[in-house]
Amino acid sequence: MDGRYNGRPSRGLAKSTIAIVAIAVVLLGGIAFAFFHLGKWQSDKAYETSATTPLAARIDQLDGDVGIAQQANGQDPNQQNIDWVKATTNSPLSVGDRLYVRDGSHAGVALNGRSYVRLEPDSLLDIVTLTDNRTQLALRSGSAMFDCGGLQSNEFFEVETPDGAVDFTQPGLYQVAFQANNTVAVSVFSGEAQVVGAGGSGTITKGETLTLSGTGTEPAVATQVSPVAAGGVINEYYRYRYPKRYDGRYVDYNAYLNDPFYYEPYRESVSYRYLDDSDYYVAGIDDLDDYGTWEDVDGYGHCWHPTVAADWAPYQDGYWYNDYPWGLTWVSYESWGWAPYHYGRWTCVRNQWYWVPGARASFRNYSPALVAFIPATERQEVAWVPLGPRDPYVPRYYDANWQAHYIGNHGDWNRFQASRFSNFNAPGAITTVPVANFNRPINRTNIVRSDPAAFANARPVADPLAVTAIRQQAAQSGFRERMAVRPEVMNRSVVASRAPILPPSERQFAQSMRVEQVRDAQARQRLQINRNNPPAGQPGGVAQNNAGAPVAAPQNPRQAAIEQQRQTRINQLSGQAANGDRRAAAEVQRLQRQQQVAQQRDQRVAQQQANRQAQMQARQAAQAQRIQQRQQAAQSQQALRQQQQQQRDAQRAQAIQQRQQQAQQNGQQQAARAAKQSRQYRTQQSQQRVQSAPQPRVLRQPTPQPRAMPQRRVIPQQRQAPQPRAMPQPRAMPQPRPVPQPRAMPQPRQMPQPQARPAPPRAQPQQRPAPQPRQQAPQQNNRKKGPGGH
């Protein structure tokens, strides 16, 4: 064979073709792989960017049975195996958490310092996205009030429902509720909202209620809210959220519209005066007003001191909760225990604990617990110490397998010793419990008192869940009571206008929580809204004529088209029937009977609607009466609370004055003690100087002479011998004793001259002078005597 083409490809050509195809497959696979990982990387970076300023919602109030559960990746899609436990106040709500409120119960959730959610009975709320500038919540049943305050232009706030997504575009107060036929109604008491669903997108403004059809084939119905009904709903909400300060003024809807931000915490709370303007993003700041005082601490500025016992220390009254995705989270039993345990730091000054809010840049960063964990595995114990203002902290989050993902550098943490923490030696700062009690409530009964020196050389752990004993105990929560939730309320899919921001490990999170994104083509359509049924001022009612009697209920477009076609057919057949066409006459009669039946049906519907309107008005009147009664009771309670508050303020002022007086007295006493010590010190110094002064030199004499002054220094040029003591006269002839002259200057030393010895007269033998050798004998003896004269 010569290798020419004979209808079949040669072996070389086949090999080339296979190689080209293989290269193309590899290139396409690499491109697809790169695009896939690029998208994954962008999603990861988006989540980590949002995680640098993470947020967590706070369960602010509870009334009745409220359950909380976590939605993990790969969970049962039928929602049968979710572990529901009863929630407590200060419990956190993070991405994937679900909150269910049973019949007869209520719950309040503080998303931040100015955004709040109040859940009505039989309501289910899911946290889909919760970051610094995006909030996405899913409401699957019940009713909820959404107070959206301080909404900035770059923030996105959405409530997802089965019938559509409700995006709040302005700060205001909104209500999203399920009707009896499972349709969703959105009421805007103040602000503006955009509704996005299968039928398109539309806008509703202040004072309107929009009822969604859900299918998208029928138009939505917009009505004007009733001022009486709106006032009742707003009054109930503010009475629940601000029970200590609300005075019932918003029972009048117009009063609310005139000043809807009267009760904003940053306007009335004393604690907000000591913080930056942006700190309203932190929930629970206004709780600090009634449970402590603000003081100026050197080096830290304004700090908050709680009103607690003398031996109190932070992180010792609550329990540890393994919250996804943030890990071990401290849940305090104290009423004010949210902001001081998840923001800022603690310091101990003069044996008193102070909460330091910290710098503005770091204050908004949520932390599950600002402590350093110190495991003592050899003793089967675990300890923790509150972090001080200058102590390091490594933010982190966890995946579905509870593997830590750190945000930033944590290498230095593993080289950090426990004794280097600023609060390590503070009184009672180290809390130690047995590992077996780690998943139980922490209080004084199960805290082990330990010596800080035992942990001086210990190393804290950046990831406490990496310790096997802690991880095993954290996975259990045996002391928390379980709850049963109807699965049908969890199986409803909800609609979102934007894809949620999810952790990198939760790629199937949206699918498991049944969140479906609206298609772009549907979102670009204009939502058909019927704003003529019912008229303004009568939500849920029917139109009325001038006499006040109900008229036929308006028909939807389909029914109107059918009625128009029927009337046209009747007009066409009437002419034929007049010419004697019996078939036409029979058809006209049949169509007229159908028309009569439709009119009767419309009248019945109108009558039913009129009855419902009358019942609603009666309920509104009864509700207004109840509101008035409650308002009167609230006013009396408010007066009583004000009186009690005044008493507390007076007591607090008296206590402060007493402390100031005590401090002044202590200062005076300290000053007096200091002055006394200073005088004593000066006296001692004076005595020491006197004692240490040199004494004048005294020459010892064998026999002290009366009043004889000590001899001074001898003139060096001529040394002279001391004057010999005069010998007494013989007793035979006593002579008067010569008196020594004072301060007689010593005479220069001279050699004694021999004197002529005169012949003593015989009659006077007593005048015979003594021999010269006898006069010098005392000098020789005086030199040889010692200090004692022996």
Image: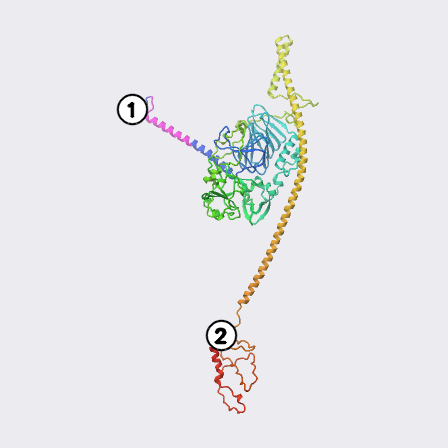
Disc on the earlier residue, 1 or 2: 1
Q: Which residues are magenta?
A: 7-30
* Residue 295 on the magenta span: no
Q: Position of residue 688 (x, y in %)?
A: 54, 65
Q: Which residue is mark 1?
A: 2
Q: Amino acid at mark 2?
A: Gly
Q: Secondary structure at mark 1?
A: loop
Dot 2 falls on a residue whose secondary structure is: loop
The quadrant where residue 17 appears: top left
- Where the N terminus falls, by quadrant? top left
CA distance separating discs 1 and 2: 150 Å
| Residue under numbered circle 2 | 788
Q: Quadrant of residue 200?
A: top right
Q: Is-magenta flag for residue 20?
A: yes
* Residue furthest front as drawn: 732
Is residue 282 or residue 305 the one in the foreground? 305
